[in-house]
Amino acid sequence: MKVQCRDFRELADSYLSDELLVETNHDVLRHLEACADCRRELAARRELRAKLRKGFQEAPQLQMREGFAGESASSLRDVALSRPPLFPMSPTRYVAAAAVLLLVIALGFSVVQIIWRGANQPTSSNPLLASLNQDAAGVHRDCALNHSPDEKPVSLAEAGRNHDRAFTNLVNAVMTEASLPAGVELVEGHSCVVKGQRFGHVILKYHGQVVSVLVTGLQQSNVRPEEVIASAQAEGFQLAHFETAGHAVFVVSGLKDSENMLLARAIAPSVSRQIKRAALQSRVLKRG
């Protein structure tokens, strides 16, 4: 099916709601890559949805009444104090319970500190990621900005079939499933190779800057349970990256670190889900 502009206008809302069949979704993506008018219409519809969602979430009638939390806490405290304890405790047990509570609080603070340090570790501590940071910056420079990759790019659908299933619905994961800030525009999506490393590449535009969202497979992965998004710089570009099981994801641009990190946080949940779905599909196909 070759999607025309009139077809896209009828399918746009279903596309944004992720209600289309996979084949139709691919047809829509191919049309969007070639049609700037429909990309602008899609961006306008996405922005309208975001404003409606925000308006609903911030509606005064849905907000917690001032003082409600304090009143509830006071009521619960009064109820608790008005009832005798089921198991009366001696002063010694109260002291022991307090000591345990302090220990739990201390351990919790230690865990927070560990996660915080992990989130701010220099990228050079992981040689593999440090090398991939350079490669990701090179993809952004050569492919997104200079349009001169090492090999001729192929479609994400083709790359998904022949190389890495995680690439198949990457544009949809970034543009439809992610909670992107208003003003993000899709430029194109494809798969390209730099220094023998294949990437799924979605090119965006935000605040006048070209942005690359890159996904590539890892032969080894040290995924931390807190799924930290780390920032770095390479070749004058700002990078934000995180790992999923078997893949590294990068957001590369000339934006400020805060803006680049905002985009990375917006896409992280949806891109991670896409990679997990792809891994599950691959396992099912292998069993079959």
Image: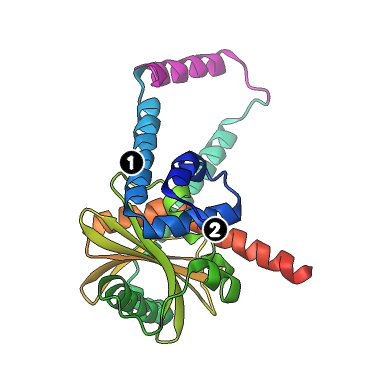
Q: Residue at x 57, y 47 (%)?
A: 20
Q: Decide: is 52 above or below 114.
A: above
Q: How dense is the environment of label 2, judged by Cα within 10 Å: few (below 14), some, or many (20 and up)?
A: many
Calculate the distance from the C-alpha at mark 2 to the C-alpha at mark 1: 24 Å
Label 2, secondary structure: give it.
Answer: helix
Q: Position of residue 157 (x, y in %)?
A: 53, 66
Q: Decide: is 280 above or below 4.
A: below
- Which residue is labeled 2 in the image? 274
Q: Residue at x 39, y 28 (%)?
A: 57
Q: Is residue 67 magenta?
A: yes
Q: Is residue 122 left or right of residue 157?
A: left
Q: Earlier in the sequence, mark 2 or mark 1?
A: 1
**Nearer-the-camera pick, 22 or 226:** 22
Nearer the observer: mark 2 or 1; the answer is: 1
Q: Residue at x 45, y 50 (%)?
A: 4
Q: Position of residue 177 (x, y in %)?
A: 48, 48
The amino acid sitting under disc 2 is Gln
Q: Which mark is residue 44?
A: 1
Q: Residue at x 37, y 39 (%)?
A: 45
